[in-house]
Amino acid sequence: MRKHSVKSAAIVGATLLVVAACGSNKEEGGTAGGSCDTSKGTLTVGVVAPLSGNLSALGIGIKQSAELAVDEANQKCTVKGYKLTVSAQDDEANPAKGAQAATKLSTDPNVVGVVGTLNSSVAQTVQPILRDKKIPQVSPANTNPTLTRGNDFLTAPKRQFDNYFRVCATDDLQGPYAANYLVEKAGKKKIAIITDGKTYGAGLAAELSKQVAKKGGQIVGQETVGEKDTDFSGVIAKVKALAPEAVYYGGEYPAAGPLSKQMASAGLNVPVMGGDGIFDPKFIELGGKEGDLATSVGAPTESLATAKAFVDAYKKKFGKEDYAAYGAFSYDAANAIIGALAKTIDGSAWDESKRDAMLTNVGSYSGSGATGEVKFDQYGDSTNKVLTVYSVTSGKWKDVQTGEFTG
Amino acid sequence: MSTSTVSTPAATAPVEKRSALAPLGKPFAVAGGVLGIVAALLPWVTFSLNDGNWPDKSTLQFFDAPFAVTGFRWHVLLLGVLVLVAAFAPVPSRGRVVRALGWGLTIVSFVNAAYITVKGGGLAAITALDGATAFGSVVGLIAGVLAILAGYGIGIEPVGEWKFKVSTPVAYLVLLVSFGAVLYAVAAMLTTGGVGASNPYAGAIFLSFLGFAGGVLGALSGVGFVRWLSALSEQHRVFSVIVLAACALLLPFTDAGNEYWMTVAANIGIYAATAIGLNIVVGLAGLLDLGYVAFMGIGALVAANFSGAATAHFGITLPFPVAAVVAAIVAGIFGAIVGSPTLRVRGDYLAIVTLAFGEIFTRSAQNNIGGITNGSNAIPGIPPLSLFGAEFNKSISIGAVKLPAGVLYYVLIVLLVAATMAVFANLKFSRIGRAWIAIREDEDAARAMGIRTGKMKILAFLIGATLAGLAGAVFAHKNGTVSYESFKFLESVTLLAAVILGGMGSIPGAVLGAALLFVLPEKLRDFEDYRLMIFGLALILIMRFRPVGLIPDAHRRAEMIERADENAEEAHVEAKKA
Amino acid sequence: MSVLLQQLANGVIQGALIALIALGYTMVYGIIQLINFAHGEVFMVASYGGLATFTLLPDDLKKSPAVALPLMFVGGIVVAVLVAVIMERFAYRPLRNAPRLAPLITALGVSVFLQEAVRVWYPDATSNLPYPKVFPEGGLSLGSVNIAWTGVLLVGLSVGLSVILQTYINKSRMGRAMRATAQDPDTAKLMGVNPDRVIVLTFIFGAVLAGVAGVMFGGYLNNINIDMGFQNGIFAFTAAVLGGVGSIRGAVIGAFIIGLIKTLAGQYMPGGTQYDYVWIFVVLILVLVFRPQGLFGEPERVRA
């Protein structure tokens, strides 16, 4: 392919000395990538998550964890005959941008499935677009129950989108589980609720307060803060006057950490509890204090070999542990798609007529992932209903109770 | 799209200043042209990059196959030839033409060189490696710089002016051909590099194409063609708008006619329509509005609540046309309310008032005020539009031609943009429009001349907000979800930037500005993280170097140039004093 | 009752912070009639500057607040001043004779740029960052009212610095030059005042105060994020307008009023803390519409 000519040879002579020091990343032996057979081409796992803006830390964790899963699959030749890639699209945590990103992925015949989204509000626009193309969507982070079971999710659940699955537990499990712990185990009867008003936090808090009332506790007050607020003194003064025994925060760690710290310095020394959104080392770094509580999905990492393997592999690939709150879920979500794809293809070639089989296979997928067992029920929700309560003990999250929500 | 301009008589403007480069002008132009052609035929990259071969067989020696030049090399070749033509042919304002072409060459060469260097892991990728050589980009860069210098050497004369008249049929033909060329260019621009995900070099290909297109456009503008064309289209306004709309409607039949680009184009259209509304407030009446996107949000919320979505709150489902009208009216009422402080507040204070209203809207929507916005849960599941049983989000077939999904939305939005453009144009040249411009220029003088300034200013807000509300209603159905997050401060700034970038008060400007601000991020996913930063920088630079925007309004341009002259005069006086 | 007292204390501290930022707005507007929209971002950048200074300190110095704290202030102030001077020189100065909207739009651009620059280039700035614990812990307890020591320090610094500033502007030669330029730049120039120098100095004063505010903000609330500049900038701007743009005393008093409105509205108005932000904007609109010269400003001779 490369031919020489006299003219260019002359130019080389003149400049070779100058550029001798210049480098390149030319690889010998082409770009086949590993020893697997990838003769049939490349298939794509899409990711839709906020890669820019305020939530980008969570979004990038989702994206990189999916990349890790795809890399491992490529190394293990999980999908015969194909190389897998990740195509990550930014939704900026904005439903409209999410729709654009989903459309972009859905017009590509080689996209076999999508990992995402982070925000439930974005999921609502992405779901129908991907459904029209029968592309499976596995969310690592949407916890709003209506996404799978509709508005009457408790009384009359109805599957909303046959292409939509999620690997995380919904608010209607996590909230009540936290309520049981607070009221029965920790003996906190008077609970104040603070949320950031977003789908995740408000939904979680709503489910919690129902269960608190059922168990004989009392919600003494409810306040909302902005997700970008840094000064909570006004809210704290209001809550303090209600003399709660614990504060439940529905939201994520960037606000929860400072809130806990500012509560302490305002003289309100009660534990803060939250969901998996605050279960992050950053929470403690930002001011989470001893005795603060969080629920999280699945059994503790230490008790799961698969979780540790994920953390190690992630650290090896990206250098640091910034997989954030939903990295492990994203890894599992990507693996569910890859596993279903391997089963769908099984030696044959991919084309769009396989999409129906692909959906069925995602639905029947079962495996052991970084968050525990990964399997979906008839609505597309995760069957993994194990929850763990963690508490801040000497500057670290420590598990105090693991179990399933039983009512 | 060739420069069929050679035979036109040009106004021979005397060249005032001769730089030191003057005697080198022509030789440099010739050298630049020749080197450009040479560059196109040299290889550009030394090895097949790890992400896949650089597009268009860049490792190939085209001296061995000179007729197989494609892609960016074809552009380089074309630019080189054009520089040579400009150097010898009697082209009006030759300096400008050569300079513009030189910039085109430089940008194309630089973009490709930079990408290859980065992707190839070092300068060896664009110079020499293992006996393979690739000096195409280096030679191209030299050619570009030479041509730019040649441009200055020849002298930057005023833009050529074409005084000759053409008969109506000829004018129609010229307009048809030109707009057809624009359609082709737009389709090419959208499709170059494919749909991001599939091509790792999409960003580079796109930027390179942009450089080429910019160079050619600059040359055409320098030669006076663009100004002549815009005068012509102004003269035959109705015909132009019809042709332009027809061209826009033809886009689905080009290569860009796939679902993805239809969606992007429809979104651009929605923002373009909103930007045109904002242009009434900012461009014509000179009232800076920093909370404008709130009106779009109000329109979207109203439409969403009447749409029959599961979480709609009014319990009434209105057909879309009715809901859209209601949305527009409600937004218009809010526009009048927000505009009412203009009776007492002016200038940048007014900007702050509008910002405050915008923030109040965002906060209230976020907190689900009155239970109608659903807060951050948004209002999802807004049904797509349908007309005579054709659902707008499905693909349709006309005879044997299968059109991509979303094409009906695209058509609807093209019509919407055309309608807002018509409203804008009619207002601009009406009594009201002149009153607005008078207010913008000098409010006190306008009042002294008998213009009821208060009424006029509120009217500007009202009409602008109505258009935004209408766009918002379409937005709600197009995207299926309405969330307060789509209507934050930054969106207002983006819209404002679209207006300023395109040219305040100019009709095509707002469309161009919106298109650029929404296409670029789609194409430049590589720079995703820097998108907003570049955007901020762009605002600063535009204000500094080209405050009139890309397609300045004629009146505005006159005003700015006059002002620049005054400033120059002042500087002159000061220099004398010193 | 104790809630009211606590909220009053919170409001005063909030006001002290806003005052430090508002002074920058009011001075710049007084001199060149520019709403320096990016001033809030100068405050934000200063906060990150202080944090960066701390991060760069050797470990043994990190442990001694007596050394680390002053160095953080210096770091924050230096960063703020640098940003402000560059901004003035390259973004605003070329536009001094441009149409009025041009500098305002430029200011928006600068604001977006600074915010994004910090987000992209400062490590982990995408989400809230914790501020180092070198500030005095604990606080005053008066009955059931708790006031953090950092809050007390913030109020002290704010009041002290504004008194110094006011004195400087009233008494010093440079202060007189500033007042002269504000009143009539052309005549001031004829009298031998170098307007460029005066303007740069104004920006520098504003930046120093914003620098102090930025570091104190981190100390008081323990966490910073890139949105803090926009939010607090708006509060400060409102305070400056409320007090009468151009008036030092007005800006400080306006700031305390805004701080109190925010906390009291959050406590007692319908909607609670969710809408405290909205009330500030309502006040802003009302002031601009009905008393654009503010509480202490002179009626503008020519409003443009």
Image (tube, coloured by chain):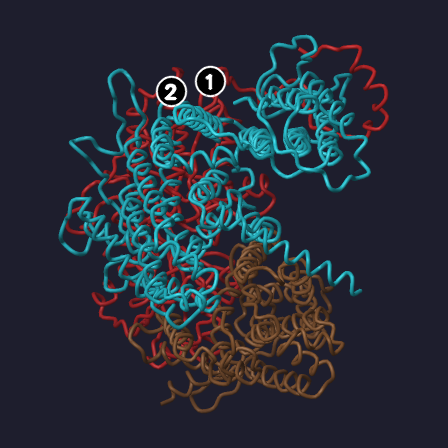
Q: Is residue A203 visible?
A: yes
Q: Which mark is residue B183?
A: none
Task: Label the cyan chain with its letter.
Answer: B
Q: Of the residues shown, which amino acid type is indicated by label 2?
A: Ile
x, y (%) of residue B372? 24, 59
Q: Residue at x 16, y 31 (%)?
A: B389
Question: In terms of secondary structure, where does tag 2 sit?
Answer: helix
Q: Which residue is mark 1?
A: A81
Q: Residues within 10 Å of mark 1 (few under 14, many from 20)?
A: many
Q: Quadrant of residue A159 in the image?
A: top left
Which residue is more in the foreground, C209 or B15? Answer: B15
Q: Mark 2 near mark 1, Cβ–Cβ under 8 Å?
A: yes
Q: Residues within 10 Å of mark 2 (few under 14, many from 20)?
A: some
Residue pointed to by mark 2: A345
* Circle 1 SS class: loop
The chain coloured red is: A
- Asked if residue B422 is positioned above or below residue B36 in the image, the reply reads below
Q: Position of residue B98 (x, y in %)?
A: 67, 30
The hue used for chain C is brown
Whether residue A179 sits left or right of residue B29 in the image: it is left
